[in-house]
Image: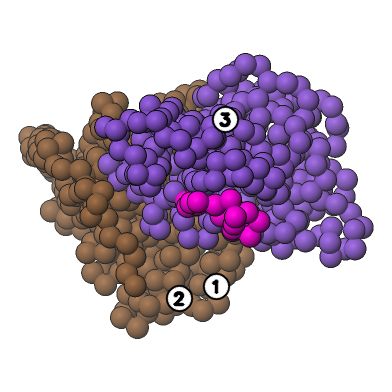
Chain colours: A purple, B brown
């Protein structure tokens, strides 16, 4: 099943299961979304529950917040993650703080879905990964799946969660396929070990997981066995799975599609240093340069971490050249 | 408050024969540029997505031909037309779409984010409403230099917070800014009336801002309205709002076939193609003959062919030389 279909199914099933769930956004209902993720939901669930809105991100997020504190379970779509700053006030200053400040009078069960990520030549303002802008906000969960199965199970969990959840969908994953996902919701905040290996722990999320898995195959040719961890959720972070792996491999590489400065990769390094200094032989980040995302193919390709660049980076950091391809035992 | 639209089809005598021919040439250049982009897209030379301006040429050309050199313009992600109307070099713009180092932004910006300060373009803005804010701010700086800022934006954008906040800001401060709403009837795939309460023009009018609704497909009408708006702003009478009624002949962006259009709508608007109207008016009012028109058209086609050839031969930027931010 395609990633986009998994998301559609999660919405479809949750709209059917719970009449409090509503879904709205720009061009999501009749046209079915700019990435063709949501066709047919309006026909199935009616225009009171699934509807198109004006181009009004501030109103969308505010409406989601207000309806959520009054008993609805809204899911909204902010078309591109780059437009999230326009919705940020309601999410950050209202939704994320409300449960705490109101002394727990009402929760804010809303979900914001948004398409993020580079690699499509969409230029600087349609390609960003806004995750780190939001992982700094207490009260907000940030979910970032990498597979169709997780997309479905985690979106269902997000909709059932009583907290505001930002649900990030990497554009380059929409056409990715895997087996039909389970109908059950997953647990938010639990990472997955996608590949086991004893030499180095590579941590990533979303499309980065696939790049890291491909990099791990390249590293295996040089005799380096990498363990690849898919975070699945960026807030709350599953530090246990990361630290456990690090204790076995003693080396940690975090791969983030996003600028290094202030990114979530730095948070994971901090966790490791604070909790497992004795296990660390090496720990570092691979992220994008601190520039906007360029349009030109040559610039964008060089800008983004790729399987090749991740593998060669790790190889050279570990002092193993491709030519040597000798067994690396750590 | 002026709300009376100038008569449609008015090839004005404010512009002489040569100036009028220049308007047509510019519109033709934009149309052929967009056709070229579309075919280069199909060949995989233009990447990501683009939002073409075909059908709306009279709006950009009519407004930009009325500007003074000290004026500045903020365009949209549908900005090729805004850029070319300002005289951004065809080759530099095309090379930008091709992602080459010879592009006006060195290949960094692409279709949606072009900037060319040498040609009065403070930017094209991929976030809707960004153009409105940028022009409002520009007018703050320009007022001491007798300059006016112009913001282009679509009908869908009038529902955005940027629109409401900036129009009020500009009106309260009596800023020299002209807001040009290009009402092409759709925001992406949604008809404007499905998501917009009331009439667009009543919004600036509620702020007691001078506003006019015009035929956005007649380049002389647009030019005349822009002259009035610019003079108003330059006099210190504050912002001015133009709603230009027009239509895009293509889908919203690359992958959109435009299936949501109402039956017959496209054909009806094609009858009112701004190039067709201008061609007819040039013949009627200025007696421009078929030969002369054909010569202009051939020259434009030649300019584009040369640009494509040069662009495809131009180098891609070297990743290594991208500068970091200045300290
Ligand atoms: C803040 C923001 N929200 C959504 C989008 C996605 N988007 C791009 S164009 C567009 C429609 C804009 O319609 P309109 O203002 O009428 O301009 P037109 O495209 O018709 O020229 C939308 C929703 C965006 N670019 N920016």
| Snapshot quadrant of residue B195 | top right
- Tag 1 residue: B169
> Helix, strand or loop at disc 3?
loop
Q: Which quadrant is the N terminus of chain A positioned in? A: top right
Q: Chain of mark 3?
A: A
- What residue is drawn where x is 47% and y is 40%? A330
Element under label 2?
Answer: loop
Q: Quick one: B292 or B38, which is closer to the camera?
A: B38
Q: CA distance from mark 3 to mark 1?
A: 58 Å
Locate residue B89 relative to residue A40 in the image: left or right.
left
Q: Residues within 10 Å of mark 2 (few under 14, many from 20)?
A: many
Residue A60 position in % (x across, y down): 68, 49
Q: Is residue A273 magenta?
A: yes
Is disc 3 in contact with disc 2, using a CB cutoff of under 8 Å?
A: no
Residue at mark 2 shares a chain with residue at mark 1:
yes
Q: Which mark is residue B222?
A: none
Residue bearing the label numbered 2: B175
> Splitting the image into 4 quarters, where does residue A238 fall?
top right
**Residue at image coords 61%, 26%:** A148
At horizontal 81% and vertical 37% (from top left) the residue drawn is: A160
Labels 2 and 1: the sequence-earlier one: 1
Read off the magenta span.
A267-285
Using a 10 Å C-alpha cutoff, classify the residue at mark 1 as few (fewer than 14 neighbours), some (14 to 19) or many (20 or more).
Answer: some
Nearer-the-camera pick, A87 or A128: A128
Q: Quick one: SS at disc 1?
A: helix
Query: Residue A113: horizontal and vertical position, in percent?
Result: 64, 41
For label 3, the residue is A196
């Amino acid at each position: 099943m395609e990633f986009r279909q998994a998301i559609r199914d999660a919405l479809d099933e949750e709209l059917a299961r719970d009449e409090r769930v509503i879904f709205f956004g720009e061009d999501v209902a009749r046209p079915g979304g700019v990435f063709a993720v949501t066709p047919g939901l309006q026909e199935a669930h009616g225009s009171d529950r699934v509807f198109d809105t004006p181009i009004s991100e501030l109103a969308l997020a505010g409406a989601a917040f207000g309806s959520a504190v009054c008993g609805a379970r809204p899911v909204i779509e902010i078309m591109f993650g780059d437009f999230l700053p326009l919705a940020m006030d309601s999410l950050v200053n209202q939704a994320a703080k409300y449960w705490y400040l109101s002394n727990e009078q009402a929760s804010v069960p809303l979900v914001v879905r948004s398409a993020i990520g580079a690699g499509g030549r969409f230029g600087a303002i349609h390609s960003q990964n806004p995750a780190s802008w939001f992982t700094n906000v207490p009260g907000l969960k940030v979910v970032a799946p990498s597979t169709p199965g997780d997309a479905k199970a985690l979106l269902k969990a997000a909709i059932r969660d009583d907290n505001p959840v930002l649900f990030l969908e990497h554009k380059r994953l929409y056409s990715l396929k895997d087996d039909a996902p389970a109908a059950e919701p997953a647990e938010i905040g639990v990472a997955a070990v996608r590949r086991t290996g004893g030499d180095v722990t590579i941590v990533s999320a979303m499309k980065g997981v696939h790049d890291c898995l491909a990099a791990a195959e390249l590293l295996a040719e040089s005799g380096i066995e990498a363990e690849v961890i898919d975070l699945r959720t960026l807030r709350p972070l599953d530090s246990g799975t990361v630290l456990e792996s690090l204790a076995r491999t003693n080396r940690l590489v975090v791969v983030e599609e996003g600028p290094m400065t202030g990114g979530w990769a730095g948070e994971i390094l901090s966790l490791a240093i604070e909790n497992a200094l004795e296990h660390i032989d090496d720990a570092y980040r691979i992220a994008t340069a601190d520039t906007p995302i360029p349009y030109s193919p040559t610039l964008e390709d060089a800008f983004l971490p790729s399987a090749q660049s991740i593998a060669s980076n790790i190889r050279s950091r570990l002092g193993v050249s491709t030519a040597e391809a000798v067994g690396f035992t750590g | 408050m002026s709300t009376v639209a100038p008569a449609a089809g008015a090839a004005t005598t404010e512009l002489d024969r040569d100036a009028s021919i220049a308007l047509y040439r510019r519109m033709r250049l934009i149309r052929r540029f967009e056709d070229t982009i579309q075919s280069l897209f199909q060949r995989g030379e233009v990447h990501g997505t683009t939002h073409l301006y075909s059908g709306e040429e009279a709006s950009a050309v009519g407004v930009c031909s009325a500007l003074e050199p000290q004026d500045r313009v903020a365009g949209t992600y549908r900005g090729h037309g805004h850029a070319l109307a300002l005289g951004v070099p065809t080759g530099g713009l095309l090379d930008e779409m091709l992602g080459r180092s010879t592009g006006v932004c060195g290949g960094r910006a692409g279709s949606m984010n072009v900037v060319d300060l040498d040609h009065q373009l403070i930017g094209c803005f991929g976030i809707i409403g960004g153009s409105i804010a940028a022009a409002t701010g520009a007018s703050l700086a320009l007022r001491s230099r007798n300059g006016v800022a112009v913001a282009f934006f679509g009908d869908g954008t009038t529902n955005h917070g940027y629109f409401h906040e900036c129009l009020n800001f500009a009106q309260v401060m009596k800023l020299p800014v002209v807001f040009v709403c290009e009402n092409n009837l759709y925001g992406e795939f949604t008809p404007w009336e499905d998501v917009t309460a009331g009439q667009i023009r009543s919004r600036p009018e509620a702020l007691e801002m001078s506003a006019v609704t015009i035929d956005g497909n007649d380049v002389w009408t647009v030019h005349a309205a822009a002259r009035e708006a610019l003079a108003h702003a330059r006099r210190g009478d504050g912002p001015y709002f133009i709603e230009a009624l027009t239509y895009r002949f293509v889908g919203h962006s690359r992958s959109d076939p435009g299936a949501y259009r109402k039956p017959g709508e496209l054909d009806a608007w094609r009858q009112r193609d701004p190039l067709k109207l201008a061609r007819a008016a040039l013949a009627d009012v200025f007696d421009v003959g078929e030969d002369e028109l054909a010569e202009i058209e051939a020259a434009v086609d030649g300019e584009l062919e040369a640009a494509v050839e040069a662009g495809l031969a131009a180098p891609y930027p070297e990743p290594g030389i991208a500068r970091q931010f200045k300290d």
